[in-house]
Image (cartoon, rainbow, N blue to C red):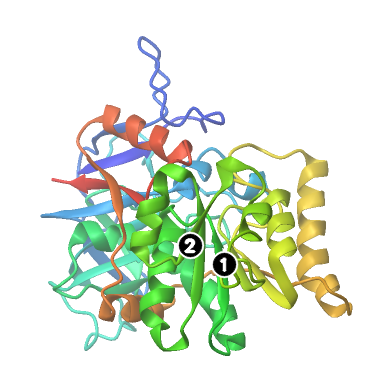
Amino acid sequence: MKAAYLKKERPAVGQLRVVLVGDNKRYLDSTTIPTAPQLSDSIQPTTTEIIVQEEGVNACSIHDDDIHMPEATFVGGHPFLQESKVVIPCSCSNESPPLVIGSDFDGIITAVVGSEVNKDEYQVGQRVCGMNHQQSVFSEKGSWAEFTVTQEKSIVSIPDTISFIDAAAAVMPLFVIHGLLEVFEKNIKGKERILVIGASGGIGSMLVTMLRKVFADYNLYITGVCSGRNKEFVLGLGADRVADYTKGPIEISLKQGDEDEAGMYDVVFDIVGGQSSYKSGKAVLRKGGSFISCVGPEAWIGDEILSTTAKISWVGRVLWYSGILNKIPGSHPMYYMVAPSELGKATYNMAFENKVIPHVDEVFPFDDIDNFKNAMDLVRSHRVKGKVVMELK
C-alpha cells in the first residue's frame, strides 16, 4: 500500500521532510507498506468505523498541523495535544507497524463495518471526504495513504459536481470555518463590515467566498488582508477592498479613503494570529465589535516548540481575552477563540450547495518523496495561495 509514514524516532522541528543520504534516519518514508491492511486479526474495527479506500483520482491536502503533529509542535507543543502512536495495521514481519501521518482525506467507501453506522446514509462506493484527528486525545488513523479507517461523524458526502482535488482542499478550511461562522451567525444583524486577516490562505480565501455567497442577503462589506501580489486574487473571491500588510500597519491604510472605505468594522476574522493582528483588529473595530480568531495570541503557532513560560503565557492570554476581558465593560472588542473538534457537516453541505470551491495553489503527485518535501516546504513558507494537495495515482 502506498503511504507516507514514520518508522523511527520523532523528527526534530523542521526535519520531517529531511532524508539524510547515507543515513538510516529517513524521517519521512514515502514508499510501500509491505501488505495492504485487510479486515483480519490485524484490524479490529469498532462499531462506528468505516473503511475508505483512496483509489482512483483522489487526494489529500497538506496543512500546517499535519507537519506540526509528528514534530510535536502542534499548538506550540502543548502536552496531551501531540500525535500518539496510531497506525494503519499491516503484515510487516518482525517490524513495528508504521505511523501513517496526515489528517485530511477523500475517497470511496469500500466497507461499512461498524454495526452502529447509518448504512442508509453511508454505503460502499460512496464518495466522501473527511478528517481524522491524530492528537493523543483522539488517537485516530493517519490519512496520507491509499487506505484509512474513519468514523461516520468524521466524513461528509461529496456531490458529483465536486472533484476529489477540490474536496480534499476544502476539508481543513471548512472544518475551521464552521467554528468561525458559529460565532458570527449568533451576532449577525446585516450590513456588517468585515475584516479577514489572512484572506489569501487556505482558510481565509474560502471564508471570503463563503461570506459573499452564503450571506449574500446581508449586504456585507468585506475587506481582505493579504500581500499586494494577492490583491486581485482576493478581490476575485468577493472582497470589496484589500489591505496590503507589507505596506505597514493595516489600521493606518484602513482608516484612509472615502466614507465607505474608512468606516469602523463590526467583525474581524483572524486567520494569522499574534499580537499585531489583535492590535490592528482592535484599532479598527467599533465598540462591542467581535474579534474571532482560529489561531490565538501567537502568530503561526506550531512553527516551533514554545518554552514552558511561553506555553503558560499563551494559555493565560487566551483565557484573559476570551474569558475574563469579555465580561469587563469597556471599549475593547469581544474576543472569541475558535477551536472546533468535530466536523460541521452542515457547513460542508452549505459550501457545496453554494459552489464554494477552494483555490488549489499546487497539486503534487503522491508517488515520490521529493514531492512531499517540496509540498511541505511550500506549506511551511506561509505563502500558499489557497491550498496544497497531494494526488494519489
Amino acid at the residue labelled 2? Arg
Residue 378 sits above or below residue 125 on the image: above
> Would residue 34 appear left or right of 376 to someone viewing this image?
left
Q: Are marks 1 and 2 in contact (CB under 8 Å)?
A: yes
Given residues 277 and 133, the one toward you in this image is 277
Q: Which residue is mark 1?
A: 261
Given residues 332 and 301, the one toward you in this image is 332
Residue 285 in view, yes or no: yes
Q: Position of residue 89 (x, y in %)?
A: 32, 50
Q: Residues within 10 Å of mark 2 (few under 14, many from 20)?
A: some
- The quadrant the C terminus occupies is top left
Residue shown at 40% from the left, 73% from the top: 210
Residue shown at 81% from the left, 50% from the top: 312
Residue 364 sits above or below residue 175 on the image: above
Residue 163: mark in rendering: none
Amino acid at the residue labelled 1? Glu
Q: CA distance from mark 1 to mark 2?
A: 8 Å
Residue 29 sits above or below residue 214 on the image: above
Quadrant hosting residue 239: bottom left
> Would residue 345 appear left or right of 301 to someone viewing this image?
left
* Mark 1 vs 2, N-terminal side: 2
Q: Position of residue 12 (x, y in %)?
A: 55, 28
User: For the view shown, which residue lies furthest in the top direction?
Assistant: 22
Q: Which residue is mark 2?
A: 241
Helix, strand or loop at label 2? It is strand
Residue shown at 59% from the left, 44% from the top: 302
Give the number of the mark in front: 1 or 2: 1
> Would residue 91 appear left or right of 22 to someone viewing this image?
left
Q: Position of residue 159 (x, y in %)?
A: 19, 75
Residue shown at 34% from the left, 84% from the top: 116
